[in-house]
Amino acid sequence: MRIGVLTGGGDCPGLNAVIRAIVIQGEREGYQIVGFTEGWLGVLENRSRKLSRKDVEDIQSEGGTILYTSRTNPYKESNGSIRVKDTLKKEGIDALIAIGGDDTLGVANRLYQEGVKTVGVPKTIDNDLSATDYTFGFDTAINIAIEGMDRLSTTARSHHRAVIVEIMGRQAGWITLQAGVGAGASIILIPEVPFYIEEICETLIKRKKEGNNYTIIAVAEGAKAAEGSKFLSQEVVKGEKIDAFGHILLGGIATLLEKEIAKRTGIETRSVILGHLQRGGRPSAFDRFLATRFGLKAIELVKKEKFGQMTSLRGTEIISVPLQEAVGETKRVPQKLYEEVVKPLWGE
Ligand code: F6P
């Protein structure tokens, strides 16, 4: 059998560990593995390369993806799905493994509904896919964000400053929540819980009065002010064009908050946008392990002809769930968890 594999959407550390496991286990099963480059674009344009064991030697420790990626959506291209099917036929691909987030897996699901044998592997630093407890890339991103906030704490302390750290997560605040708690941020702002600028400023002034001579504020790029607050009440965008899946490019809420907080409190304030640092570099141990397990499971699903399925982490078990489930609603931080870990430590 010839098995296709692609990596789509935002890249993250761990992708190469999945590819490595797919190639090694696939070859053990006697399969030929064909990598398509730049996500779905590679299938549309038939840009492929045979992958063998020597191509994946030791890549589990490398960030990024040897197959490159893109945010191409075949269903936004003329005759997109037909061109995809033509490529798969021409290359004699018997099954296709798509490694990606809700956008990439949404395409894999539609193609499955149209008769293509697809298997999905969930990937995103955002950890916002509801059909799996964790996605690889998330743990590495948390550690990068914590490392950044730990470093910013020493300079904030030296200057008696408030430092606002903007963290990725698109519409879900998982990275901001876990990294913020881990770094001991006094204020944690996530998209799921609109904030009041008035409350933030009161907290900063109170901290200053109590002799806390610096504050770290962790803010998700998709955080927004509550209705009624006399401040920005819509998410901040970089104003870039919408991508092929309808997403706007977020970024800049920290800069706005920096100006507003300094103006309202008189406290010296700075802001830092961690941005794509959270997507770069070597994967954490957790992500390498999870990604490898996902790759092995993907080959098992192909072998058992369980298509239209996605690998999934449930507790400590690797299972499979219908792709349809994976591409449902975004997994967002529940209010209960926010109440449990943010409220008690707010302002500390
Ligand atoms: O989906 C992962 C992610 O890193 C989001 O957290 C972020 O908003 C987005 O991708 C950035 O997209 P791009 O890499 O296309 O700039």
Image (tube, rainbow, N blue to C red):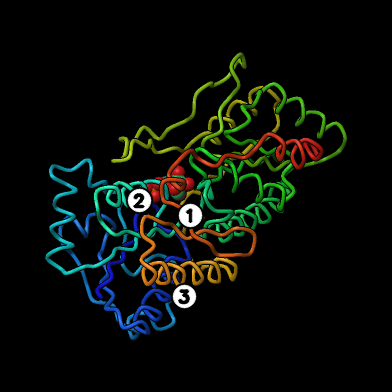
> What amino acid type should be assigned to the residue bearing mark 2?
Thr
On-image quarter of the N terminus: bottom left
Image height of 23 relative to 265, above or below = below
Query: Which residue is disc 3 drawn over?
Result: 60
Query: Viewer-proximal residue, 45 or 161?
Result: 45
Query: Which residue is disc 1 drawn over?
Result: 321
Query: Which residue is disc 2 drawn over?
Result: 104
Location of residue 192 in the rendering, given as x and y in whole percent from the top left corner: 60, 33
> What amino acid type should be assigned to the residue bearing mark 3?
Gln
Location of residue 42 in the rendering, given as x and y in whole percent from the top left corner: 22, 60
Query: Would residue 208 be found to the left or right of residue 185 on screen?
Result: right
Circle nearer the viewer, 3 or 1: 1
Location of residue 198 in the rendering, given as x and y in whole percent from the top left corner: 69, 21
- Of callouts 3 and 2, which one flags the residue occurring earlier in the amino acid sequence? 3
Query: Would residue 292 be found to the left or right of residue 46 on screen?
Result: right
Circle nearer the viewer, 3 or 2: 2
> What amino acid type should be assigned to the residue bearing mark 1?
Val
Location of residue 342 in the rendering, given as x and y in whole percent from the top left corner: 74, 39
Give the CA distance from mark 3 to mark 1.
25 Å
| SS state under label 2 | helix
